[in-house]
Image (cartoon, rainbow, N blue to C red):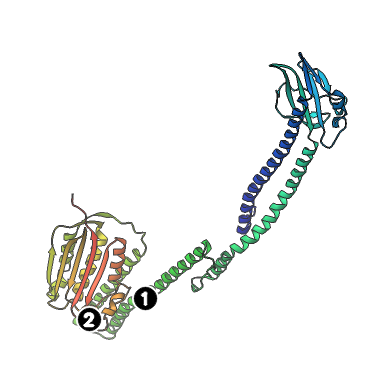
Amino acid sequence: MQQLSFKNRIASHYIVTTALLIFVVFFIIYSIIKFSVYSHVNNDITSEVEKHLSEIEIVGNSFHLIHKEEWKEREHNTLDVNPVFIQFVDQNRNVIEKSPNLKKSSLLFNEKKGENKFFDTKLADNSIRQIQVPIYQKTKIIGYIIIAMSLEDATMVLNNLFEVLLIVYPLILIVLFFIARFIAGRSIKPISSIITTSNIITKDNLISRIPLPQNRDELYILSQTINNLLDRIETAIEREKQFTSDASHELRTPLTVIKGTLEVLIRKPRNPAEYEEKINFCVTEVNRLNHLVDQLLLLARFENQKQSLKIEKVYLNAIFLDTIARNSTAIQSKNINITTKFSGDYYIETDSYLFLIIVNNLISNALKYSNQNGNLTVNIKSINSKIECHIIDTGIGIPKEDLENIFNQFYRSQSNAHPEIKGTGLGLSIVKRLCSLLNIDITIISEENIGTRVVLSLFETDLK
């Protein structure tokens, strides 16, 4: 079965709610009018009871009308618009007197209804409202006066009202449905814009945006949220394209160098020393290419936060000392003076493998960009329940205008000014991504030709 459209569903839900509300309102109106009509009849019957009780005379254990002939000549001898029927019975329920308009009929005494209570009954197939009032001789009941009033007029009014409400009810709902459908259609018009815009957006067309409605309602927020999502998608795709382009360029460079070297090598016979030199050069380029691929795979691996972290207690001091030891070759080749300042033993809860990558990248960077006979200082201290790890070098530094771009992929500051320093431009991108995953704050302060300070801020864990 085909489902209703969103517009029709809104109108239908509105109509269901409105139908219940109108039903309750109509029921209340009908009940109020019925109560009013019956109250009027009850008041008229009560007045008749009081009037006729005053027209009887009690003698001993019996009673009779004081002016019987006058009573018969009154309005009761004809059927008027709203006739009143009167009947007197003794304590044995025998009829003593009744109004002429009853003719051959009689009002029946209802034992179940009791005394002084209004109830509906029938008189010759006509609806009447009746009451049975006892007549007392002191404390003894010597008879009853039964008074009834026709309900034909009241019934006619209530039936007419019921028919009107019954006819008006569906008509109102039908009219309200079309009104609600029209209003719902106008209200969800921005959704049509969302659908239209979404249909024209593809991976090659991410420029289009959903027009924002004038009213700042939920649809405005929805449209704005979708536009923000499209902005993020466009940014991510542009970054992906840029990453692919840069990665292709970076991979192509060492491959071109290797290909060119090998082509030169096979053009003519060479002595073993030349073969060894060229092969070693190619091996170096292959190692560089292998390192680049490892960096690219590592960056892609942690591009999303789906990587499960293995959190454990890590001894910071050992991480830094082990990393320095692994870079001993670079330290000795440049004769770098290493200084470690650990004011205590520090532990943190983190992923040791990822944190080791962060520290290794930062220290290898510091060594790579340090001058000959330079200094490298690693300082770990506790400040306001946080641990700060400072990695300070006296290298070439980073120009102020380059600081905001150093975390971008494949960005290398002063690569033209220092071509002798090889790199991929991915190290700090990886560091930034891993710091984000591990909730570590990283700050880099640098001054050209003076040096660079990298600060890692993380939470300390008590050793217990």
Say whether residue 205 is left or right of residue 129: left
Quarter location, residue 65: top right
Residue at the far top: name it. 60
Q: Is residue 350 above or below residue 95?
A: below
Instruction: Look at the numbered discs 2 and 1 and tell me whether their residues touch, using CB distance below 8 Å.
Output: no
Residue 301 lies, with reference to residue 405, above or below; the image says: above
Q: Is 140 situated above or below 452? A: above
Q: Nearer the viewer, residue 167 or 65?
A: 65
Q: Amino acid at mark 2?
A: Glu
Residue 23 picture location, percent across and down:
66, 46
Identity of the residue furthest to the bottom in this view: 268
Element on which disc 2 rests:
loop
- Choose between 167 and 130: the one closer to the eye: 130
Identify the image quadrant of residue 40. top right
The total number of labels drawn is 2
Q: Is residue 332 above or below residue 183?
A: below
**Closer-to-camera residue (370/405):** 405
Instruction: Give the x, y percent position of residue 99.
Output: 84, 26
**Which residue position is annotated with label 2?**
420
State the residue at coordinates (28%, 82%): 261
Amino acid carrying label 1: it is Ser
If you read the primary sequence from the N terminus, does the residue marked by circle 2 or circle 1 appear first?
Answer: 1
Q: Which residue is mark 1?
A: 248
Q: Report the disc number at residue 258.
A: none
Residue 48 location in percent, x, y? 77, 30
Label 1 crowd (10 A; few <14 / some 14-19 / many >=20): few
- Classify mark 2: residues with Cα within 10 Å, few (<14), some (14-19) or many (20+): few
Q: Describe residue 238's horizontal placement relative to residue 195 as left or right.
A: left
Report the Cα–Cα distance between label 2 and label 1: 22 Å
What kind of element bears circle 1? helix
- Find residue 157 and report its horizontal and vertical position in percent: 77, 41
